[in-house]
RNA sequence: GCGCCUGUAGCUCAGCGGAUAGAGCACUGGCCUCCGGAGCCAGGUGUCGCAGGUUCAAAUCCUGCCAGGCGCGCCA
């Protein structure tokens, strides 16, 4: 896993220090663990910390402090990157890097540009990422929105990590829900033509059904009245679901989410995939007949019990379609399958894992990411929703109200398997309280700075020609150090399938930028002023001499512009991973 | 009854084997002659649900319990 140049260099420096110590007889172990190197939690602890000594101490049967000193000695004499190595109880190695090491980070960002942070961990392995997959029986709700934002972000994270990802939407266009939709629309259709009909029990309510029916009337007139109820109903259903799917597609596209493939459940029946998949299982002796039904021996693969795939009445169960669907995914030669499901389907996961294993794949080949519910808050109160009564706020409503960027960022701010509180007021705020604006503003602020620099004819040099040694302020160094962590954050987000790490990272980066920007000037003052004057006398004691009175030299301006250019690039890259725009102006 | 998820600051949540457990919000008080104040600074809080255990080291791993959510159909 890639973690960025700095961390990688130090990790290998420690690894070779261990080997050297053994060669000199200072350590005995034949094998050493991969040294863990983390960014220090506190600045007083240096830049990076490692706990290897405490792990190695065990196998060496020596005290952690002893071992730490041995490693520290080797590092100090041979690693040119280090300014200072200290050993701290109970056995930590705290490392401070030479300041100029960090400039390599800026060079890497400039070199990689919008690919900074990317890796080839996936080595081109193929991933099928299935998400949203809502029944075409109604508009998308908040839960689907969260799944959509997550899926889109995961596809970007994985592609950035070297995987070849296809996004797929599974259309549940077979089965009872569809029949119910057809019934509901047909009933309305008849009612519109003055026929008295009982509305189906559990039928779909809501204004959209009414609108849908009107569209059917508009399209078909009273033609359906002449058909048999079965045929008319079927046509109503097909027409309605086609329209709904169209709306879903448009809503998702407007939300910035598009799919490579739309896979129809109904097609599994017509293509014979279901029979094919079940025949495959039968060949492996994993199906049997009991009580007139056909069962899948899922209990052989840690499912709690066997499951029916074909009912007594000869109809296939939903599980049968899903088995066939996943069979087909495997046939399509994907290395990894990722499904994003609503958390209320979690009980279904063992069944799908069983299916995957039944077809001879490792369970790990399928990863199911569960998405918890979204609770909408308005004025601090939960917005109650009832689908049955047709009272609910759709994804489109929310996107219209707060904007796609804010919606996506909010959906991705929390781990997907925890409940999400979505504060509509907060999402709309144009201030620092709103994390989306806080981050986007950082980007827009920089864009504005570069615009002004350009107007004034001030060049942003390349990293190579920039006088980077002028960067010595703590706020500058903190920014660079934070930039160095980005590849590791990206890699962790991708491997954990957890984009929320990116949102946290970006908030921190934006914070560091705002602090820097408040304290330090970048461009010379408007007059001919080359002095960096103090904005207010109040802070004289907390600010270092450079920023209070010293000359803001051309070198410093150049160096800071280069630094900020790289900050801007990383903000862009991070926002892109979330599917959120990086605005030039706001 | 069985299974899964969640319990961390007033609130929303990070952290998921490492050092004195963090952030945002809320609250209080400051800060705009100049690059975007859509910003910054300063104030303080935790029996990490409870109890055992493993470990040099536990919010983090294991076991049991408590609380909340969800799931356990020849529904989809």
Image (cartoon, rainbow, N blue to C red):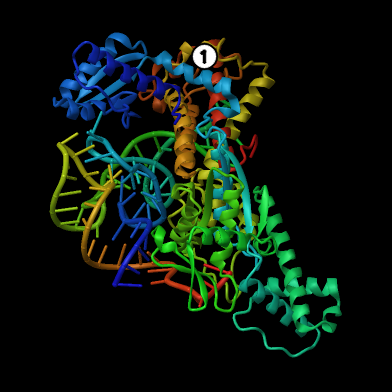
Q: Is residue A473 above or below residue A159?
A: above
Residue closest to the eye, A111 or B62: B62
**Quadrant location of the C terminus of chain A?**
top right
Q: Disc count in the image?
A: 1
Residue A566: percent from left, percent from top: 55, 24
Q: Quadrant of residue A154?
A: top right
Q: Is residue A217 in view from this perspective? A: yes
Within 10 Å of disc 1 (Cα), the crowding (few <14, some 14-19, many 20+) is many
Residue closest to the eye, A2 or A305: A305
Q: Please give the residue where the numbered disc 1 appears in the rendered image.
A: A556
Q: Quadrant of residue A116?
A: top right
At 34% from the left edge and 17% from the top edge, which residue is drawn? A13
Q: Is residue A461 left or right of residue A33?
A: right
The chain holding disc 1 is A
Residue closest to the eye, A57 or A531: A57
Q: Quadrant of residue A392?
A: bottom right
Q: Is residue A492 left or right of residue A211?
A: left
Q: Is residue A429 in view from this perspective? A: no
At 65% from the left edge and 51% from the top edge, which residue is drawn? A255
Given the current orientation, which residue lies at the most extreme bottom position?
A: A196
Q: Is residue A411 above or below residue A482?
A: below
At 59% from the left edge and 44% from the top edge, which residue is drawn? A333
């Amino acid at each position: 896993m890639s973690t960025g140049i700095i961390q990688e260099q130090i990790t290998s420096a420690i690894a070779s220090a261990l080997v050297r110590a053994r060669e000199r007889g200072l350590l005995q172990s034949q094998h050493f663990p991969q040294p863990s190197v983390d960014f220090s939690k506190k600045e007083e602890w240096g830049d990076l910390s490692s706990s290897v000594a405490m792990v190695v101490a065990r196998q060496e049967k020596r005290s952690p402090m002893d071992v730490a000193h041995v490693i520290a000695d080797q590092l100090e004499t041979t690693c040119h990157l280090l300014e200072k190595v200290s050993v701290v109880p109970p056995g930590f190695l705290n490392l401070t890097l030479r300041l100029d090491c960090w400039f390599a980070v800026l060079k890497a960002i400039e070199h990689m540009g919008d690919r900074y942070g990317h890796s080839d961990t996936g080595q081109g392995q193929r991933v099928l990422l299935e998400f949203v997959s809502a029944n075409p029986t109604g508009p998308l709700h908040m839960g689907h929105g969260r799944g959509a934002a997550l899926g889109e972000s995961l596809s970007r994270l994985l592609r950035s990590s070297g995987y070849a990802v296809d996004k797929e939407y599974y259309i549940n266009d077979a089965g009872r829900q569809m029949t119910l939709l057809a019934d509901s629309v047909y009933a309305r259709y008849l009612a519109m033509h003055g026929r008295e009909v009982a509305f189906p029990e559990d039928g779909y309510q809501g204004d959209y059904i009414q609108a849908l029916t009107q569209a059917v009337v508009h399209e078909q007139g009273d033609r359906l009245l002449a058909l048999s109820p079965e045929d008319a109903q079927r046509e109503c259903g097909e027409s309605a679901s086609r329209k709904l799917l169209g709306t879903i597609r448009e809503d998702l596209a407007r939300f910035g989410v598009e799919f490579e493939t739309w896979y129809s459940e109904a097609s599994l029946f017509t293509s014979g995939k279901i029979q094919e998949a079940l025949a495959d299982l039968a060949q492996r002796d994993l199906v049997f007949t009991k009580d007139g039904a056909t069962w899948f021996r899922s209990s052989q693969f840690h499912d709690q019990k066997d499951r029916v795939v074909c009912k007594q009445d000869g109809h296939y169960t939903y599980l049968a379609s899903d088995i066939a669907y996943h069979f087909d995914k495997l046939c399509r030669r994907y290395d990894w399958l990722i499904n994003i499901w609503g958390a209320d389907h979690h009980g279904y996961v063992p069944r799908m894992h069983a299916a995957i294993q039944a077809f001879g794949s490792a369970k790990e080949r399928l990863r199911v990411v569960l998405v918890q519910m979204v609770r909408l808050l308005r004025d601090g109160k939960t917005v109650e929703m009832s689908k049955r009564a047709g009272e609910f706020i759709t994804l489109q409503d929310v996107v219209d109200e707060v904007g796609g960027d804010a919606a996506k960022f909010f959906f991705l701010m929390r781990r997907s398997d925890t409940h999400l509180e979505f504060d509509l007021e907060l999402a709309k705020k144009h201030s620092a309280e709103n994390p989306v604006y806080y981050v986007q503003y950082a980007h827009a602020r920089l864009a504005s700075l570069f615009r002004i620099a350009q107007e004034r004819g001030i060049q942003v040099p390349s990293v190579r020609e920039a006088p980077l040694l002028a960067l010595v302020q703590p706020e500058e160094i903190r920014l660079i150090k934070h930039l160095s962590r980005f590849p590791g954050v990206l890699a962790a987000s991708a491997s954990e399938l957890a984009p929320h790490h990116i949102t946290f990272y970006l908030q921190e980066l934006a914070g560091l930028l705002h602090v820097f920007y408040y304290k330090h000037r970048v461009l010379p003052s408007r007059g001919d002023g080359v002095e960096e004057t103090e904005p207010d006398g109040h802070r004289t004691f907390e600010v270092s001499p450079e920023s209070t009175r010293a000359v803001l030299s051309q070198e410093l301006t150049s160096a800071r512009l280069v630094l900020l250019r790289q900050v801007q690039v990383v903000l862009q890259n991070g926002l892109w991973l979330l599917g959120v725009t990086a605005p030039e102006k706001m």
